[in-house]
Image (tube, rainbow, N blue to C red):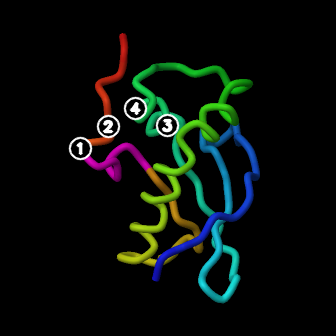
Amino acid sequence: MALNRGSIVGYNADRMMFEFTMNTHNEKKVACQISSVAMDQMDGVRGTPPSEREAQFVRLRDSIEKIASDIYKVEGAVHTGKVRIFEKHLPDGRARKAIG
């Protein structure tokens, strides 16, 4: 089952994760997170400041949401009740070598 766009929650600096929601076909909210390392890898940068994380998420949103939806199709929101995206989840074609 694919997920649809939800809302932006924001950057959690303690967890170093950007949080957002997506919705199932029957409008059930699914909590989602992507690590700052994964976002930087997708963006081809390193060490994006917390104040710039939301703009980075918005820029990468379509790709991030596709990955979250694909993870949900395969795994659901297993164990944690959330879909979590880490660097290991990035498709080879989308991950660019980080600068540095």
Q: Earlier in the sequence, mark 4 or mark 2?
A: 4
Note whether 48 is above or below 38 in the view shown.
above
User: At 65% from the left edge and 74% from the top edge, which residue is drawn?
Assistant: 23
Mark sitting on residue 39: 3
Residues marked 4 and 3 touching at CB (< 8 Å): yes
From the image, tell me which residue sits under label 1: 92
Depth check, front residue: 66 or 15: 66
User: At 52% from the left edge and 57% from the top edge, which residue is drawn?
Assistant: 65
Q: Position of residue 83 (x, y in %)?
A: 52, 65
Query: Callout 4, which amino acid?
Result: Gln
From the image, tell me which residue sits under label 2: 95
Q: Residue furthest bottom?
A: 26
Query: Callout 1, which amino acid?
Result: Asp
Give the distance between the C-alpha atoms of the residues marked 4 and 2, in whole angstroms.
6 Å
Q: Secondary structure at mark 4?
A: helix
Note whether 77 is above or below 33 in the view shown.
below
Q: Secondary structure at mark 1?
A: loop
Depth check, front residue: 47 or 21: 21
User: At 52% from the left edge and 43% from the top edge, which residue is drawn?
Assistant: 35
Residue 87 is one of the magenta-drawn residues: yes
Query: Callout 2, which amino acid?
Result: Ala
Residues marked 4 and 1 touching at CB (< 8 Å): no
From the image, tell me which residue sits under label 4: 41
Mark sitting on residue 49: none
Residues marked 1 and 2 touching at CB (< 8 Å): yes
